[in-house]
Image (tube, rainbow, N blue to C red):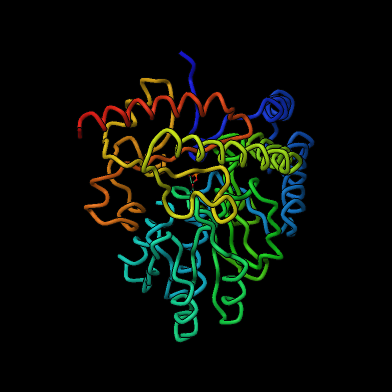
Amino acid sequence: MQRVYLDNAATTAIRPEVVDEMANVMKNVYGNPSSTHVFGREAKALIELSRKNIAQRLNVTSAEIYFTSCGTESNNTIIRSCVNDLDVTRIITTDLEHKCVLESVKDLEKREKVDVIRLNILKDGNIDYDQLEELIKDQSKKTLVSLMHANNEIGNLTDVKHIAKICQENNTLFHTDTVQTVGHYDLDLKDLGVDFASCSAHKIHGPKGAGFLYAKKATHIKPLISGGGQERGLRSGTENVYGIVGLSKSLDLALDELDAHISHIKEIKQYTIDQLKEAIPGVAFNGLSEDLEKSLYALLSIKLPFHDSLIGFELELAGIAVSQGSACSSGAAKVSLVMSTLYTDEEIDQMTPLRVSFSYETTKEDIDILISTLKKIAAKHQLQNA
Ligand code: PLP
């Protein structure tokens, strides 16, 4: 059976060029980057070259990039340090953030370290920008705004440049989770004006276990992990040298080939939308997912017009890997927080959400297999309801 992978928002296949680059380092450079002898200096040089490259590609300075193990660690470090070390006592965020943000914020709230305001979510899945602007004007408490750039479940894009501007004007810190957008867009972090951002290599055809956080020079966050003082004191622990090299290489490849990837993936996404509409009457899309410009172009959040809690298994039997929510919380097909924020219980009882996410490797043949399988599942539901 041909296997079809349509879960690239969960993780991507590592590129062979990245494997080659990493294997070369694994074989030839094994010094501890903290050692002062030549073996250590070789490893250290690779880390610093990677940092410089990543910083240049995002138009920031090397001093603003800190390597971590993943997006989760980056987001945790930023949010917790803002509260623990930068005197933040109020966080403005949403219920639609990734679990690593939701849980960090919840934990700080539980310990009564911060007041948390979760913004209203409009019917299209966007935040209420007017509410945010109003809230930000209150400067009685040092505030952190934490809003993701692209939602990992429905794909809605947040206007981070606009938010960064109003945060700056109101003396407010702004963290944006860019795990789904670094390498998918040509991001200029300096121009965007955010204070903090995050990245995970495995979302951009790089290795698992490598990521970075961006912290604007003036922000001075402090470490979650202490020890030998690596990463200029922010993240102790011997560095994942080949992971860092792989991260840098995967970002290079993603950005060098960005235009071609965007146009291929957008074509695939539009093809999926068109084919779905033809095959399944009543199909719709969650949030702004159908809009190629207002949502992440590599992700389509489908709203099937019938309820099928076993759809993940049915697709799996046909060799198709998709997600019903975000992978990081999945396994079980329970209703996600995002869906329960967007829909009423009655609406949820009459639909099935399905997230398909594409890469430069996705083909129309993959989509045809998905559509023909979904068509059969939809026909079964029509028969049951006839
Ligand atoms: N933030 C977003 C938006 C994500 O989609 C993910 C992963 O799905 C993460 C953070 C966590 O990244 P990692 O898997 O590297 O911990």
Image coordinates for residue 32, horizontal then vertical, percent: 67, 37
Q: What residue is rendered at 42% in x and 33% in y? A: 279
Label tally: 0
* Left or right side of 191 for 359: left
**28 or 107: nearer the eye?**
107
**172 or 337: nearer the eye?**
337
* Left or right side of 208 for 135: left
Image height of 126 relative to 16, above or below: below
Image coordinates for residue 167, horizontal then vertical, percent: 57, 75
* Left or right side of 141 for 329: left
In the rendered view of the protein, which quadrant contains the C terminus?
A: top left
Image coordinates for residue 20, horizontal then vertical, percent: 71, 25
* Left or right side of 120 for 137: right
Q: What residue is rendered at 62% in x and 67% in y? A: 161
Image height of 138 relative to 204, above or below: below
In the rendered view of the protein, which quadrant contains the N terminus?
A: top left
Q: What residue is rendered at 54% in x and 52% in y? A: 291
